[in-house]
Amino acid sequence: MAGRKHLPIQLTLDDARKPTGHGGWRPGAGRKRKSRRGVTHDARPVLKARYPVLVTMRIAANVPNLRRRKLVHIVRAAIAESHKDFFRIIEFSVQGNHIHVIVEATDAGALSRGMGGLETRIAKRLNTHLGRSGDVFADRYHERILTNPRQVRNALRYVLLNARHHMADNGAFLGETWFDPCSSAAWFKGWRTGIPLDEAWKRELAAMPPPTRAPTQWLLTVGWRHYGLIALDEEMR
């Protein structure tokens, strides 16, 4: 009937969110939400105790370069205090804006707890030393589960020779006997020729108690060696 007023209809939440084709809400509409973190919060992959893990922790942009003697000492001390029955740090290297570690953990939950403890120790001590507050790590750590001997050897070489690779790319000549003092290279047992103690800083490092733990998994103790021990100056391919 003309002139008849339509009574308002109370919409349910489901009705209100149905796309009509005439504007309004529709799936995927609106400003896209940006993640503050660089690593997604998807569920972590299943981890079996026999597999080691390569983990990378990226540092926030306003934290100074970590490759300073005192800062490396802080990271090293935090590593030494972070071992548990279910979590062990086997190798590490400290780079300017990130830290690599190779760890053993009994399962994904153990890895998460162990890494949480390690990151907390590093963050608190760095903030105290630097007189700052706020986040030290830029995002969630990134993990890669290593499931075969070749992957493990590549990961060991990557972690221990990372600084040599970057410095060589920048034109530095390091020589055949140089190893990274900001890593666990001084205590690594898989070098082809062993650690040369021809300089005072090398002897000082070699005399320190290792902050890392000896590996227990077959892949880290025996498996990777089938592809050959690692040379101090081995090229990254």
Image (spheres, rainbow, N blue to C red):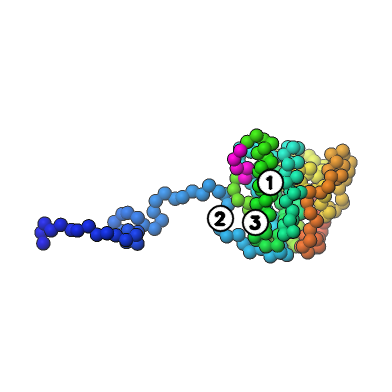
- Circle 2: element type: loop
Density class for disc 2 (Cα within 10 Å; few <14, some 14-19, many ≥20) is few
As for residue 134 lying within the magenta part, the answer is yes
Q: Which corner quadrant of the image does residue 136 belong to?
A: top right
Task: State the image coordinates of residue 93 (x, y, percent, origin top left).
Answer: 73, 47
Q: Nearer the viewer, residue 219 or 157?
A: 219
Stretch in magenta? 133-137
Q: Nearer the viewer, residue 123 or 34?
A: 123
Q: Disc 3 residue type? A: Ser
Q: Which corner quadrant of the image does residue 75 belong to?
A: top right
- Mark number displayed over residue 41: 2
Residue bearing the label numbered 1: 121
Q: Disc 2 residue type? A: His
Task: State the image coordinates of residue 198 (x, y, percent, origin top left).
Answer: 89, 41
As for residue 192 lying within the magenta part, the answer is no
- Circle 1: element type: helix
Q: Residue at x 27, y 59 (%)?
A: 10
